[in-house]
Amino acid sequence: MLPEFLKPYHLENDHLIRIGPKFDGGYVVAKKSIQGTNTIITCGLNDDWEFEKSFLKENNNCRIIAFDHTVDKQFWVNRLKKDIMHFFLLKKIRLRKIKGIFRYFDYIKFFGGNNSHHIIKIGAQNIAHKEITITKIFENQKDVFLKIDIEGDEYKILDEIIDVSNKINSLIIEFHNIHKHMSLIEKFIKNNKILKLIHLHGNNFAGKNNEGDPHVLELTFLNIKKTKLELVKTKKNYPLKNLDYKNLNRMNDLFLKFND
């Protein structure tokens, strides 16, 4: 069972919306946080920007700034080689691989003009310009929707997120290996006076422990000063019907239980 501090605050389902696909890469957010957003800052990109595309359909007046040091020229060379190999070897999934081959061109198109991708690592220290901090990124920002999926490095930047929380409309963050870092997650949630947890979902791709709790959680936070959220803990059962979907379709979704 998950600890009580991970139980979200209540929002009616019609105040929530899913942005992105009905599988991995889609997230549940508060509708109120969308229209007031000027900038989406994405930390961790890989080859998936469907969330950002869907967000722009709801609010086309904001721009995307992405950071991911792994998505460089070699990343796309390796991706193209793999897609071509799979195209010739795996006939059953040829259509999907054809689309994958052209993913680079979609990347160039999407991250041109108003949107940008920076090939630099998110870190807690800016060492010889090899890393950039959340503090630096937020220097000239306000009304930000912050999305973080950086494969475990999220624990290094939690204090900085709290420091800039007054500039954040909403935060989506994936916590990895939660059972090893539960004290850090608890500290972040309890010390954050502005951003409050309104939704969570277990990522079934990463599996679960012997008690049935997920190894990876997707959490959504909302700025209560901007949205005037009433702080009442939810009585909902998760995942939420018609909002939450399995990250990996061939595996069962993870049903979350809390210690009361």
Image: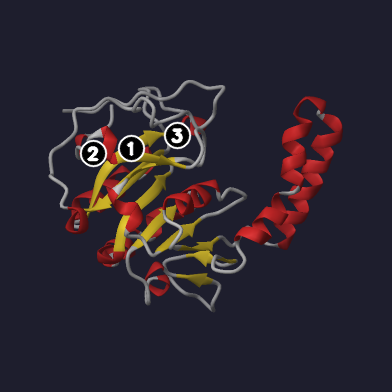
Total residue callouts: 3
Q: Quadrant of residue 69?
A: bottom right
Instruction: For the residues labelled 3 and 1, say whether their Cβ atoms are less than 8 Å apart.
Output: no
- SS category of the residue bearing label 2: loop
CA–CA distance between discs 3 and 1?
Answer: 10 Å
Q: Is residue 197 left or right of residue 109?
A: left
Estimate how packed mark 1 is, as few (under 14), some (14 to 19) or many (20 or more) residues with alpha carbons within 10 Å: many
CA–CA distance between discs 2 and 3?
Answer: 17 Å
User: Which label belongs to residue 101?
Assistant: none
- Residue drawn at 77 percent across, 55 percent down: 77
Residue 164: tell me if it is visible: yes
Residue 30 position within the rendered picture, expressed as x and y whole percent measured from the top left: 30, 45
Three-letter amino acid code at the position of disc 1: Leu
Q: Earlier in the sequence, mark 2 or mark 3?
A: 2
Instruction: For the residues labelled 2 and 3, say whether their Cβ atoms are less than 8 Å apart.
Output: no
Instruction: For the residues labelled 1 and 2, say whether their Cβ atoms are less than 8 Å apart.
Output: yes
Near-viewer residue (237 or 22)? 22
Residue 180 position within the rendered picture, expressed as x and y whole percent measured from the top left: 37, 42
Q: Earlier in the sequence, mark 1 or mark 2?
A: 2
Near-viewer residue (11 or 190)? 11
- SS category of the residue bearing label 1: strand
- Residue drawn at 38 percent across, 71 percent down: 138
CA–CA distance between discs 1 and 2?
Answer: 7 Å
Q: Is residue 98 above or below residue 259?
A: below
Estimate how packed mark 2 is, as few (under 14), some (14 to 19) or many (20 or more) residues with alpha carbons within 10 Å: many
Residue assigned mark 2: 8
Location of the C terminus by quadrant is top left
Residue assigned mark 1: 200
Residue 50 position within the rendered picture, expressed as x and y whole percent measured from the top left: 54, 46
User: Which label belongs to residue 203?
Assistant: 3
